[in-house]
Structures are given as structure tokens and as C-alpha cells.
Image: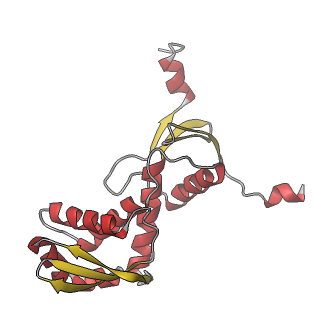
Amino acid sequence: EEERSSLPHYDFEILAQIYDTFLLVERKGIFEIYDQHIIHERILYEELKEKFYNKKIESQHLLLPLKMEVTVIEKNIIFENIDVFQNFGFDIDEFSENEIVIRAVPAFDFRDSIENVFLQLLLDLKNEVEIKDLRENIIISMSCKGAIKAGQKLDISEMQNMVRRIHEVGKYTCPHGRPIIVKLSKNDLDKMFGRKK
């Protein structure tokens, strides 16, 4: 009995992961389908935002500084906003006319190479016709790159943690506004199967 009470209590039950992308969950008598990438993206977004605004993002130095080619536009975005990049944990120097060198990056699990992450970040920033809030864009870009992808197998405890965390966060769209959960009540299912009009 004692052992059982030490297990975390969840007010939901994970039924399955399907297509290695969606989590099937029963919660409070409702059948729910979650998109694993979007749940994780939202959780990371909230965590990064909190860390950034409380100045808690840590930086890690690269053993081998990363040299990268950049366009004039990209270079301008970086060096006109160098303080913002530094606050995120990036240490960037100009190397030559069309090259930069990255000496340090945020201590964050990106699940991708730093080069890809940084290129994507610059692409996202360039595509914003006016960068209303550079910080917000960097947070969104980083949380998207850090989130587990569709097509990735998860174990039960990973699924439980993600579903629990998203309900603690209490926000149910991704930073771009896509929904995280699709719900089906017994009533909805009854109607689909023609049990009810």
C-alpha cells in the first residue's frame, strides 16, 4: 500500500501513442487526443520565457567555436540586436565580411545541430517582415527546435510528464496558435456512430 501511495497521482490516463505522434488520453470522462510536438513546444516556450525574463538562461561555451557564413541582412539582424542574443546565451563575434563565429550558445537541449538551429533562427527572424519582438521570436524558434518531433516513440512516463506539465501550464495552443488537444465526449462518439441524432 505504501508503495502505491508514493506513485504520482494523475487525473488522466494515457491510453496509447499512435503514429508516434498523437497521445490518446482519457481525462475526466472525456477522450482527448494530444499532439506531442505541440505540447512539448508549449511547455518549452513557457519555461524559456520565464528563464529569459528572470535572466536565468545559462550559456555554454563551445569547445570548437562555430564559424558560419551569413548574409548582410542576417549579420545586421545579429549585430543590431547583439545584446538580445547575449541575453539568450549566445556569444557571437564578427569574423569577416560574410562570416560570424559563435563561441557560446544557450545551455538548452535543441535536439539538432547548433548550426541548423541558428540558421533556422535567422530564417525565422528574416521572414518576420517587421520583427515586432525579437525576443518573442527567438523564444518561439528555440522552443520549436527543442521540442520532440512527430514520429518519435515515447515511453509512458514521458507521456505522463508532458500531459501533466501542459495542464500545469494551462495554455492549450502552441505559440503560433495551433490547438494542442482535440476532445471527443461520449456524446460526440454516440453521434458519430449514429446512436444519437
**Vertical arrangement, residue 71 with respect to residue 174, above or below:** below
Q: Position of residue 26 (x, y in %)?
A: 61, 39
Q: Residue at x 56, y 52 (%)?
A: 163
Give x and y (percent) for residue 149: 44, 51
On screen, residue 83 versus residue 26, left or right, reads left
Quadrant where the N terminus lies?
A: bottom right
In this view, 30 is above or below 113: above
Colouring rule applied to residues: secondary structure
Identified at 55% across, 55% down, the residue is 162
Q: Residue at x 26, y 66 (%)?
A: 119
The residue lying toward the viewer, choosing from 96 and 126, is: 96
**In-image side of 82 versus 60 (left or right):** left
Residue 193 in the image: state x and y as whole percent: 51, 16
Is 42 displayed left or right of 71 in the figure? right
Q: Is residue 192 above or below residue 70?
A: above
Question: Residue 82: which quarter of the image?
Answer: bottom left
Instruction: Give 140 or 169, whichever is nearer the viewer.
Output: 140
Please tell me in which quadrant of the rendered image residue 52 appears: bottom left
Total residue callouts: 0
Furthest residue to the right?
Answer: 1
Q: Position of residue 192 (x, y in %)?
A: 48, 19
Observer-nearest residue: 92 or 24?
A: 92
Q: Nearer the viewer, residue 94 or 51?
A: 94
